[in-house]
Structures are given as C-alpha cells and as structure tokens.
Image: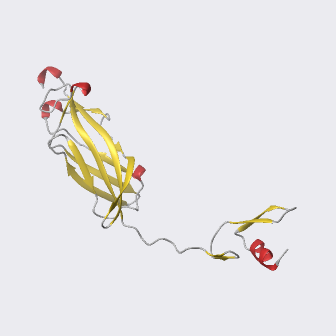
C-alpha cells in the first residue's frame, strides 16, 4: 500500500472496497490525492412564485367555463404562508379579472421548503358562493413544483396550487 493510500484510509472519509484489488472510494471533503474539490457555489437569492385560479362551482358568472361547471372569481384575496418553527413569511395577493393569481416573493425564501408553504384563500369575494368546496374547509393548498425561472436578482422556483373552488349554499341563489 502506498503512503497516499495509507493516508486516505487513515482519514475517516474513505472506504476500502476490495481487499484483492485496492480500490478506494473517497466521500469528499478537503484535499485528496486527486486534487482539491471545487469551491462551493456563491449564495443564490432564491425566491418563489405561486400561481392558480379561484372558481365558483355551479354559478354562471362572467367567464363561465362549461367543462368545469365553474366561473372565475376575480378579486379574491389570498396569501402565501410559509412557516418553520418560529420563522414565518406571509405574502398577500389578489386574483385578477379571470380569477387567476400569481404571487411572487421579492425576498429570499430559501429558509423554507415547499412543504412548509401553503396558499390560503380565506373566503370568496362573492357572498352567494361562499362555501369552500376544494380543498374542503380552510386548509391551505399545497405547492406543486413546475419549473425554475432565472431572474435578474437570482433564481425563482415556480409552483402551482391548481384550482380553489367555492360553491353556493343554495345553487338556485347564485
């Protein structure tokens, strides 16, 4: 065994894979016999964007979409909430004319994972269509990854929450 191999095996970062042929697998860190590892990447400002649509099921308002039997709910107020322990981030948003929303964080949110973030639509802007249908109750909508988007100030993860549906208590009173 050479001096270099003895040094590599003496460090706790390498594993001897075979006794008949000496093959050493190094698990990284510091300098090795092959040279030094590349430097870590610089800090990246990672922000997120979340998009979706808020609908009223069974009511025929402007923009009614027959395949879903639903109408978009423009003006719905919503918010993105990320929470981990004592740290929290809340970003407010509002649906546009077609019920579509896009919330983009301007600050770095790399301290949170997508499982720690949800989008909440507390109530419908139309009183007649105020019963949460999907997701049921006041549970927030989980984020589903779509793509990475390069921005001037860093990288943005784009997520979708899909559709938030409300329904009327009485479909005859839309």
Specify the color scheme.
secondary structure
Question: Which quadrant: the N terminus?
Answer: bottom right
Q: Position of residue 77 (x, y in %)?
A: 19, 46
Q: Position of residue 156 (x, y in %)?
A: 35, 58
From this view, report whether residue 84 is shown above or below residue 69: below
Q: Nearer the viewer, residue 8 or 167?
A: 8
From this view, report whether residue 19 is shown above or below residue 7: above
- Residue 59 as seen in the image, left or right of residue 120: left
Q: Residue at x 15, y 39 (%)?
A: 125
From this view, report whether residue 165 is shown above or below residue 84: above
Question: Which quadrant: the C terminus?
Answer: top left
Q: Nearer the viewer, residue 58 or 140?
A: 58
Q: Position of residue 90 (x, y in %)?
A: 28, 56
- Residue 30 as seen in the image, left or right of residue 114: right
Q: Nearer the viewer, residue 11 or 97?
A: 97
The residue sitting at the right extreme is: 20
On the question of residue 151 being in view, the answer is: yes
The residue sitting at the top extreme is: 172
From this view, report whether residue 31 is shown above or below residue 119: below
Q: Residue at x 44, y 72 (%)?
A: 42
Q: Nearer the viewer, residue 55 or 149?
A: 149
Q: Residue at x 17, y 29 (%)?
A: 64
On the question of residue 140 being in view, the answer is: no
Write down the quadrant of residue 22 in the picture: bottom right
Q: What is the tally of numbered marks visible in this picture?
A: 0
The residue sitting at the bottom extreme is: 3
Q: Residue at x 11, y 32 (%)?
A: 62
Q: Position of residue 162 (x, y in %)?
A: 32, 40
């Amino acid at each position: 065994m050479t001096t270099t191999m003895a040094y590599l095996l003496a460090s706790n970062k390498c594993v001897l894979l075979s006794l008949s042929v000496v093959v050493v697998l190094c698990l990284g860190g510091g300098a090795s016999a092959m040279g030094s590892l590349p430097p870590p990447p610089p800090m990246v400002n990672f922000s997120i964007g979340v998009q979706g649509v808020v609908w009223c099921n069974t009511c025929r308002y402007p923009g009614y979409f027959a395949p879903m039997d639903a109408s978009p709910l423009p003006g719905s107020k919503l918010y993105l909430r990320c929470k981990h322990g004592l740290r929290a981030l809340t970003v407010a948003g509002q649906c546009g004319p077609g019920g579509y929303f896009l919330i983009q964080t301007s600050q770095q949110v790399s301290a949170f994972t997508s499982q720690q973030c949800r989008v909440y639509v507390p109530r419908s802007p139309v009183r007649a269509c105020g019963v949460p249908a999907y997701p049921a109750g006041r549970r927030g909508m989980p984020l589903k990854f779509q793509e990475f988007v390069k921005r001037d100030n860093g990288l943005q993860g784009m997520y979708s929450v899909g559709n938030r549906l409300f329904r009327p208590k009485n479909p005859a009173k839309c």
